[in-house]
Image: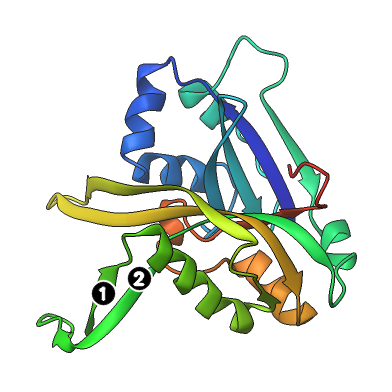
Amino acid sequence: MYLSRIALNTKRRETLHALTSLQFIHSAIENSFDGERKRNLWRIDWYKNKCYLLVLSVEKGDFSNIVNQFGYTDSEWQWETKKYDPLLSQLEKDQIWKFRLCANPVRSSFKERNKRTDRGRIFAHVTPEQQKQWLIGKSESCGFKLEEDGFDVINTRWIKFYKGKYNHQVILRAATFEGLLTITDVERFKQSLISGIGRAKAYGCGLLTIARPRGESL
C-alpha cells in the first residue's frame, strides 16, 4: 500500500470549487490509477496554513492530473508517495500513537425510518462532545482505545454539494479528531488504517493516520 500527499493551490479557482464540491476531488483521485476503479481513502489536510490532499491506495498513483487541475504546476515539489507496509509492520499492542482522523459521525434511528429504503434514518452528531463520544464508542471495534481528555475535535463543519444528473444534494457533518490513541488489537487496528472508519469515505472521510507522539505524519 501507499500513502501519498499532494499540495493543493488554494489560490486557484478550480481548487476552491473542488474543496466545496468534493465529488470533483473524488473523481480526480480515481482517475489517477490505471485499470478498474477502486475505492481509495483520502482526506484534505491543512498544515502550517497550506492545503494538502492525502491518499491511501493499494497501487502507486500518478497524480499529474490532480496537480494540473488543483496543484502547483510550476513547483518542483508536487507530490510525494511513501510505502505504507513498513508502518503497518511496526504496530504492536499497547503502543501509543498520535493520530488524526476526519470522519462523519452519525447515529441511526429506527423509530424514524427512511420511506424509500425502509432503513433507520441517519442523523449527524453535530456537537464536539457528541462527536467525541461517537469515536470513543467506535474505538474498541477498531482496535484502539482513547482517553476522553487525550484527544479533541479540532474542526467540525457541514459539507454540502450536489451530485448526479438529478442534482441530488449531499449533506454531511465532518469532524476532524486529533490526539493520542493506544492500540488494543493489532489486526483490527490495521484494518481500520487500511479500510477507514465510518461513512462518507468517497467524500474525504474515514482516513486515519498516525505518527509517533513527537513525530510528524506524512
Dot 2: within a 10 Å radius of its alpha carbon, few (fewer than 14), some, or many (20 or more) residues?
A: some
* Vertical order, 108 against 49 (above or below): below
**Tag 1 secondary structure:** strand
For the point 80% across and 65% down, the residue is 96
Q: Quadrant of residue 111?
A: bottom left
Location of mark 1 (residue): 122
Q: Is residue 198 above or below residue 158?
A: below
Q: Which residue is mark 2?
A: 106
Left or right, 40 with reference to 186: left
As rendered, which of 108 and 43 lies closer to the eye? 108
Amino acid type, label 1: Ile
Coloring basis for residues: rainbow
Res. 53 visible in picture: yes
Q: Quadrant of the C terminus?
A: top right
Decide: marks 2, 1 in contact (CB < 8 A)?
A: yes
Is residue 60 visible in the rendered image? The answer is: no
At a point 52% along the width and 22% down the height, the residue shown is 68
Q: Amino acid at mark 2?
A: Val
